[in-house]
Amino acid sequence: MALHTHPTHHPDDDLLVAYASGDLDEAWSLLVATHLAVCPICRSRVEAAETVGGALLENIPTDDLADLSDDALERALERVAATPPDFVGERDGSGSLICKSTSTVTPVLPQPLRDYAGGDVGELEWRRLGSSAFHIPLVSGRGAPAARLLKIPGGTAVPEHGHNGLELTLVLAGSFVDDGERFARGDVETADTDLEHQPYAEAGSDCICLAVTDAPLRFRGPMARLVQPFIGI
């Protein structure tokens, strides 16, 4: 399986900056951290945001530091500790942060996603989602964004649907096509309330994704709407 690709679809910069400052909910943070593990471009952007944030903190008058939350430093240190352990940082000729794998076998699920899922793809117990797809819920909570792994067999389309909120889908293996655009490993598709679509997994291999939503989807088909309350998506 060829996993070494260069993502061409990325999360919005606002999301990366929010991640760098520790202002994201758990599900969004999981998706961004997983994307960073396979995308050197966004790792450099997050590092730049953290550097700017650190410089700004150094210039804040001492009296103003009292306005910071009690756990601001702890959250910043957690971001440093969460650097994906499958990679070590290096600098290229331009000074940009790059990563080099420390393992001879590249897992499908990078850290920290493997810890949430309980292993790599071949070790997981997938739950059926509809007639042919499978999923594994990872992060859920009343009123909070939810994250789940999805496995769509190659050549299969997902039911046509819209969105009541925001959905980000990160491809981890295989690929899918949506409205003429192709999304492969490391790519992130952003879908909002204006989008009605029916992505399909390209033939040849299963498409495995990490999907995060902050509101239920809007399915058009009666069967999908019928089972939606039972699958929580």
Image: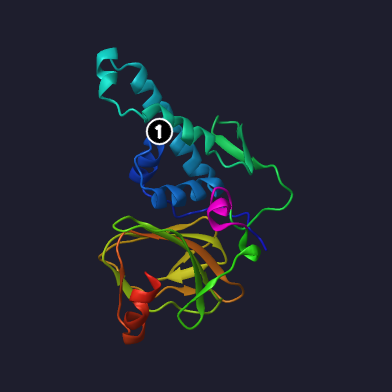
Residue that protrudes farthest toward the top in the picture: 62
Report if residue 85 is visible in the image: yes
Which residue is more in the foreground, 216 or 74?
A: 74
Q: Position of residue 6 (x, y in %)?
A: 56, 52
Q: Is residue 114 magenta?
A: yes
Where, by quadrant of the figure, is residue 17 drawn? top left
Residue 128 x/y as whole percent? 50, 76
At a point 36% along the width and 29% down the height, the residue shown is: 72
- Please, which colouring scheme is shown? rainbow
Residue 196 vs residue 85: left or right? left
Image: 47 above or below 55: below
In this figure, what is the number of numbered marks? 1
Q: Which residue corresponds to the image point at 65% horizontal and 55% vertical from the top-left?
A: 107
Q: Report x, y in % for residue 90.
A: 62, 33
User: Horizontal placement of 100 versus 59: left or right?
Assistant: right
Which quarter shows the N terminus? bottom right
In-image side of 35 versus 13 (left or right): right
Quarter of the image that includes the C terminus = bottom left
The residue where tag 1 is placed is 49
Q: Which SS class for mark 1? A: helix
Q: Residue furthest right?
A: 104
| Residue 41 to residue 186: above or below | above
- Residue extent of the magenta highlight: 110-119
* Residue at x 63%, y 41% (from the top left corner): 87
Any magenta on residue 10?
Answer: no
Report if residue 168 is visible in the image.
no
Q: Dividing the picture into quarters, in which one does residue 99 lie?
A: top right
Q: Amino acid at mark 1?
A: Ala
Residue 184: x, y in percent? 53, 62
